[in-house]
Image: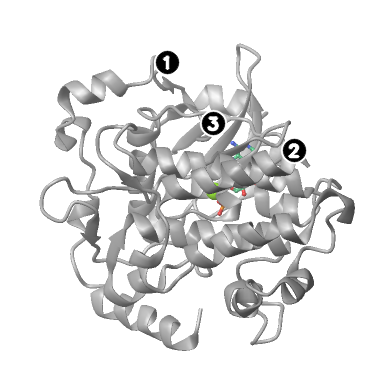
Amino acid sequence: MPFSLVSAWNKRRRSKSHESFDQWTYKPLEYWQLNDRSSRFRRSNCSLVFTFKEMEEATVSFNEKNLIGKGGFGRVYKGTLRNGEVVAIKKMDLPPSKQADGEREFRVEVDLLSRLNHPNLVTLIGYCADGKPRFLVYEFMSRGNLQDALNGSNNVTLEWPVRLRVALGAARGLAYLHSTSAIGVPIVHRDFKSTNILLSECFEAKISDFGLAKLMQEDGDDDVYATRRMLGTFGYFDPEYALTGKLTLQSDVYAFGVVLLELLTGRRALDLNQGPTEQNVILQVKNMLHDRKKLRRVIDPEMCRSLYTTESIAPFAELASRCVRIESDARPTMAECVRELQLMLYACLKE
Ligand SMILES: Nc1ncnc2c1ncn2[C@@H]1O[C@H](COP(=O)(O)OP(=O)(O)O)[C@@H](O)[C@H]1O
Ligand SMILES: [Mg+2]
């Protein structure tokens, strides 16, 4: 992100930090007035409630050997439930100053994810709020997150057809969230990034982490929401959101474009180990996406050359560049991204 945007973001954050966060206070399902729609779209298998003892047993007392990740919310353990099901258990582990935010995220995640049902969204199996500790229990995604997979953490290179399928799966998940078919109102994810795309054994993509998600207002401006607090992750911030504070579904499209660039180049969205001009993947490649010769230079060299052609990658690069346009209106919708990626995958499999 250019420096001016970062400083605008910081300035906004500083000036708004005193404001009330009442839009974040926990609201029960009834608050969203989904009434009959909520029951129509409610998952048949509602989230299970676990005790602390069950969480301890599942992870062998949170044994470090079962630790599979660490994130903004806390630690993630691989665990086995009493019925033998292998799961991922996220344990809230926050300093006291961040616990109120953590609690809000926990409740949004439980409230929302137990009502969503799509093959490209990670399944919430249940939760534990037994006393003070908080746990979220998810289906276990054996290939971990996309960012690690792109960095070759499993000693498996993601080849071009697999990357296309991952992009399409993630696009489908986001398009479902943005549509009203999820719970009756569009949902903006707000923290879409490569570490929040998890991969199953057969590299099927599923979106995770809904703690920052926001239901868009139905009345008035139906897909714009003025936020009082900037939330999200550096490297994926929609510049329009950073400048105006207006959250739209198109903010997710921007973040999706950044992930497409990560898939294309194998680079991180933001890599602080690089020099100042090479830290941000968008700034680094955006002028190279429309020229075939330059495009060849940015394609991830880890991918097997015989499994793609520059011609087949060009429409993908072009879509990525439209998703990361500064003006949100100029970006495609997620439904359009799904259609285009479907055509690309179809063409790739025919080759
Ligand atoms: N359901 C899951 N299955 C497998 N691994 C997971 C699962 N959920 C999270 N993880 C792993 O734990 C890591 C930390 O998760 P998280 O707390 O969501 O932080 P972040 O999204 O910032 O990486 C993820 O990046 C992923 O590698
Ligand atoms: Mg995550």
Q: Earlier in the sequence, mark 2 or mark 3?
A: 3
Tell me which colouring the rendered structure shows. Answer: one colour
Task: Kindly identify which numbered label has been placed on residue 138.
Answer: 3
Q: Secondary structure at mark 3?
A: strand
How packed is label 1: few (under 14 Cα within 10 Å), some, or many (20 or more)? few
Q: Residue at x 60, y 47 (%)?
A: 167
Q: Earlier in the sequence, mark 1 or mark 3?
A: 1
Q: Nearer the viewer, residue 87 or 303?
A: 303
How packed is label 3: few (under 14 Cα within 10 Å), some, or many (20 or more)? many
Q: Secondary structure at mark 1?
A: loop
Look at the numbered disc 3 and say if its residue's Cβ is closer than 8 Å to ligand 1.
yes
Label 2 belongs to which residue? 350
Q: Position of residue 324 (x, y in %)?
A: 49, 67
| Left or right: where 25 falls relative to 77 | left
Q: Residue at x 50, y 84 (%)?
A: 2
- Three-letter code for the amino acid on which mark 2 is drawn: Lys
Q: Position of residue 151 (x, y in %)?
A: 77, 57
Q: Nearer the viewer, residue 177 or 31?
A: 177
Q: Position of residue 270 (x, y in %)?
A: 61, 71
State which mark lies toward you, 2 or 1: 2
Q: Earlier in the sequence, mark 2 or mark 1?
A: 1
Residue 263, above or below 211:
below
Task: Kindly identify which numbered label has been placed on residue 45.
Answer: 1
